[in-house]
Image: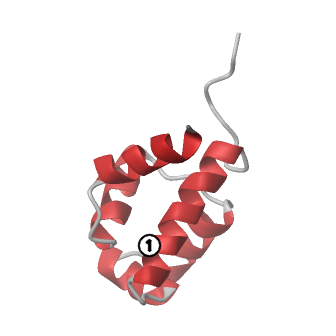
Amino acid sequence: MKNIRLSVHSKEHTKLRQLLIRRRLDLGLSQRALAERMDVVHSFVGKVETGDRRMDIFEFIDYCRALNWKPEEVLQSLQEEAV
C-alpha cells in the first residue's frame, strides 16, 4: 500500500516548489515582496521554497493567488511536467 503523505522532498513536491519559485522570479518578486502580498512573514515563503515547510490547501490557494495564478493552472502544469 502506497503512503499518500509524501515528503516535502519528494520529486512531486520538488516540482511544485520549482514551479512556484519560477513564477515568483518571472514576476520579479522577492520572497519578502511575495510574503507581503500574502500577509505572512517572509520566512514562510523561504521555508516553503526550500521544502522546510509544507502548505495546506488554503495556503496553497493563497500562495497561487499572490502569484496571480489560478491554483488549477498550477496543478495542470504539474500534470504536464509529470507526463
Q: Is residue 36 visible?
A: yes
Q: Secondary structure at mark 1?
A: helix
Q: Residue at x 51, y 73 (%)?
A: 22
List x then y, in percent, for residue 28: 42, 90
On the image, numbered disc 1 is attached to which residue?
Answer: 23
List x then y, in percent, for residue 23: 44, 72
Quadrant the N terminus occupies: top right
Q: Residue at x 71, y 44 (%)?
A: 10
List x then y, in percent, for residue 19: 51, 62
Q: How many marks?
A: 1
Vertical position of residue 4 compared to residue 19: above or below: above
Drawn side of residue 65 relative to residue 79, left or right: left
Amino acid type, callout 1: Arg
Residue occupying the far front of the picture: 83
Q: Quadrant of residue 69?
A: bottom left
Vertical position of residue 6 compared to residue 81: above or below: above
The way the protein has been coloured in the rendering is secondary structure
Q: Residue at x 26, y 56 (%)?
A: 70
Q: Residues within 10 Å of mark 1 (few under 14, many from 20)?
A: some
Vertical position of residue 65 compared to residue 15: above or below: below
Q: Is residue 41 visible?
A: no
Quadrant the C terminus occupies: top right
Front one among 53 and 67: 67
List x then y, in percent, for residue 21: 53, 72
Q: Residue at x 57, y 77 (%)?
A: 43
Drawn side of residue 44 relative to residue 13, left or right: left
